[in-house]
């Protein structure tokens, strides 16, 4: 649990630093959050079906399962 708290503290700090550089919360969040987690802005989740799958997500899923 302690390791998770340290990770979350670091992630929050990185998001704040990114915001200070970009002055845009959306860009800050999505520049820090791991893309493989599939985070998308609210309202844009339906747009995922329009994008062509790259196959990279499948590779990440396979690695997580081992």
Image (cartoon, rainbow, N blue to C red):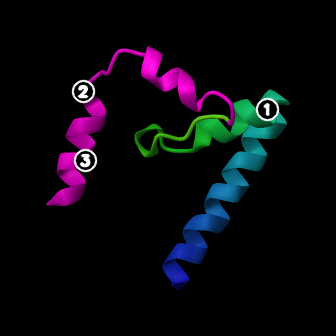
Query: Residue 21, how many percent across, how many down?
Result: 79, 32
Q: Is residue 20 above or below residue 44?
A: below
Q: Is residue 45 above or below residue 15?
A: above
* Quadrant of the snapshot with the C terminus: bottom left
Q: Nearer the viewer, residue 8 or 58?
A: 58
Query: Residue 27, how many percent across, how many down?
Result: 70, 30
Q: Main secondary structure of the magenta part?
A: helix
Q: Is residue 58 left or right of residue 52?
A: left
Of callouts 3 and 2, the N-terminal one: 2
Magenta stretch in the rendered image? 42-66
Residue farthest toward the left in the current orientation of the protein: 66
Asked if residue 2 lies in the magenta stretch, the reply is: no
What residue did someone put label 3 on? 61
Label 3, residues with CA under 10 Å away: few <14, some 14-19, many ≥20: few
Distance between the alpha carbons at the discs numbered 1 and 3: 32 Å
Distance between the alpha carbons at the discs numbered 1 and 2: 32 Å
What residue did someone put label 2 on? 55
Count all numbered tags in the image, as a single digit: 3
| Residue sitting at x 58%, y 35% | 40
| Residue sitting at x 62%, y 27% | 44
Report helix, strand or loop for mark 1: helix
| Residue sitting at x 61%, y 66% | 8
| Residue sitting at x 71%, y 37% | 28
Residue farthest toward the bottom in the current orientation of the protein: 1
Of callouts 1 and 2, the N-terminal one: 1
Label drawn at residue 21: 1
| For the residues bearing labels 1 and 3, Cβ distance under 8 angstroms | no
Label 2, residues with CA under 10 Å away: few <14, some 14-19, many ≥20: few
Query: Residue 34, how many percent across, how many down?
Result: 48, 43
């Amino acid at each position: 649990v302690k390791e998770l708290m340290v990770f979350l503290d670091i992630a929050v700090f990185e998001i704040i630093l990114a915001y200070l550089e970009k002055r845009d919360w959306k860009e800050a969040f999505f520049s820090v959050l791991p893309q493989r987690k599939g985070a998308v802005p609210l309202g844009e989740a339906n747009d995922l079906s329009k994008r062509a799958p790259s196959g990279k997500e499948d590779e990440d899923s396979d690695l997580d399962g081992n």
